[in-house]
Image (cartoon, rainbow, N blue to C red):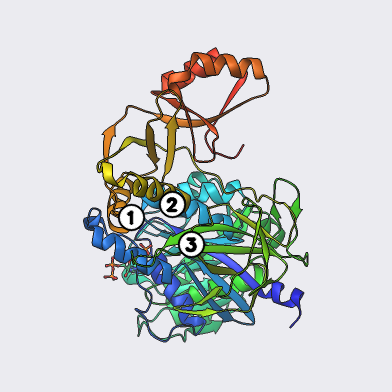
Amino acid sequence: MGFIEELEKRRTFGIVSHPDAGKTTLTEKLLLFGGAIQVAGAVKSNKIKKHATSDFMEIEKQRGISVATSVMAFEYKGRQINILDTPGHKDFAEDTFRTLTAVDSAIVVIDVAKGVEMQTEALVKVCKMRETPMIVFINKMDREGKDGFDLLDEVEAKLDMKVVPLSWPIGMGQRFQGVYNLYKKELILFRPHSKQDLQEEIIVIQDLADESLESHVGEAAAKELREEVEMIEEVYPELNVEDYLAGKISPVFFGSAINNFGVKEMLDCFVEIAPHPLPRDTEERRIEPTENKFTGFIFKIHANMDPKHRDRIAFLRICSGVFERNTNYLHVRQNKKIKFSNPTAFMASKKSVVDEAYPGDIIGLYDSGNFKIGDTLTEGEVLHFKGIPSFSPEQFRYVDNADPLKSKQLAKGLSQLMEEGVAQMFVKKNNGRKIIGTVGALQFEVIQYRLKNEYGASCSYEPVNLHKACWVSCESPEAMKDFMAKRKRDLAEDIDGKLVFLAESAWGLKMAEENHPDVSFHFTSEF
Ligand code: G4P
């Protein structure tokens, strides 16, 4: 198979949802269809259960699982499908944001009873920022939930997206009889049978006026379905694949992941319409996946849990060309050539060394500390991929050394954990004190635990009253000098040496913006 065929075969996507909506269950069913696993229950949930938020062993266990499930690849209908796992816990939201930089499309799972939840909103916002095409799966139709039309209204309003239902439910909960596939004009009947069963009962009904509908779902449900479908046809547009690919509309499917119902319809549509690897922007130029020179970027770094083997796995998304084993590539930030003897591909739960990988593929590179999130690898061209920003953190603490004999270990540990993207560190300009900023409170405990466990270092925290950290820039050197002189005690540097303003309150930030109109304040590190 040639390069272009390999490229066009790939579909790389992520599933986003609020915890408990059914992401793990859906992932597992997709893998079953792809023949990548044989039994249900093979995919472990990587979520940190609510009750275990401060159980460190649990965190460690979950980290182990999440390496295995970081990327799950399988083949289906001639496509190579790469599912990128996204952590569900809100404290790891930044990890999820970064993973979404490596996908070409997304599936959004929504619980029919709960509707659009907070985490879904945040993640969809990130997908929209990048115009990532999305398909929506309304899950748990075997339970009582919201009315279909109300739910679609809620999705449109809260997620600010236009939707096109491609399947429509017939009843729900106890009365759930199945779905009508509006795309294929097929009636799919729900029989709460074995959860392993991949066969569905499909009846082709091209025209809903067909009287046989009654014999399958009964009179009342048939009448209701006809009325609802008529309404759908009036209210919603037909699927325009171009609009989907441009991130302007999202097809919606209804089903029940646990019962393996409605999943196949979505998967069949997904392989038909989801985009193959898309171009990616760098600061220098746009990279087309069809270019024959290899380029790629690191979007995730995972440390080995065994403290005796301090190596890490850096996850590389291939953007163009063919990545080859044992070939020298330019590590742009370090301006040095490196080659990889054991690049790893992830086929479902199996890992294996690969000789080559194509655009859209994710491979794991063993790393002894060379990489940092956002790093670029190329065949020689100096490029910097865009869209892998750090987000302005919301929780802050001073971090201090609690064991003076281990200050080197602490410095190394902190720097490596920051490179992995666990949290962000800022060094204050006026006194050199270090402040750790995170999205969630859990990270503080994770850092303390990992420093001890992996680096033998101890840290203590001290509260610091901060509202936001924002990156600053300014066109005028004089205005910048004035700003820096006046706000010295509120300034710090991030690990890349970029200038950061630490605002004590929303009001303080507003005042700084008003007093220094020439200075721009940014809420992500990329501007
Ligand atoms: P997540 O990864 O998005 O957090 O969700 P996950 O798949 O773990 O699913 C959350 C819960 O919802 C699980 O139950 C799962 O069995 C259930 N679930 C998933 N899909 C459906 C569905 O279509 N219908 C119904 N009724 N339930 C569904 P749990 O009790 O939390 O866990 P478990 O003990 O079943 O593993």
Q: Is residue 224 left or right of residue 54?
A: right
Q: Are marks 1 and 2 in contact (CB under 8 Å)?
A: yes
Examine the image and state in which quarter residue 328 appears: bottom right
Foreground disc of the pair 1, 2: 1
- Whether the residue carrying mark 1 lies under 8 Å from ligand 1 is answered with no
SS for callout 1: helix
Task: Pick whichever, 45 or 251, lies toward us.
Answer: 45
The tag earlier along the polypeptide, 1 or 2, is: 2
* Quadrant assignment for the N terminus: bottom right
Q: Residue 331: horizontal and vertical position, in percent?
A: 64, 57
The tag earlier along the polypeptide, 3 or 2, is: 3
Ligand 1 - quadrant of the structure image: bottom left
Q: Amino acid at mark 3?
A: Ser
Q: Disc 1 and disc 2: Cα gap in Å? A: 10 Å
Task: Pick whichever, 132 or 84, lies toward us.
Answer: 84
Label 1 environment density (alpha carbons within 10 Å; few <14, some 14–19, many ≥20): many
Examine the image and state in which quarter residue 329 appears: bottom right
Q: Residue 366: horizontal and vertical position, in percent?
A: 50, 67
Per the rendering, the mark at residue 482 is none
Look at mark 1 in the image and give the residue it sits on: 455
Look at mark 2 in the image and give the residue it sits on: 416
* Quadrant assignment for the C terminus: top right
Look at mark 3 in the image and give the residue it sits on: 368
Task: Pick whichever, 224 or 438, lies toward us.
Answer: 438
Q: Disc 3 and disc 2: Cα gap in Å? A: 10 Å
Residue 164 in sight in this render? no
Q: Residue 417: horizontal and vertical position, in percent?
A: 41, 51
- Is 490 drawn above or below residue 247 in the view shown? above
Q: Residue 18: horizontal and vertical position, in percent?
A: 39, 55
- Is 199 drawn above or below residue 392 in the view shown? below
- Is 13 drawn above or below residue 400 in the view shown? below
Q: Is residue 118 left or right of residue 494?
A: left
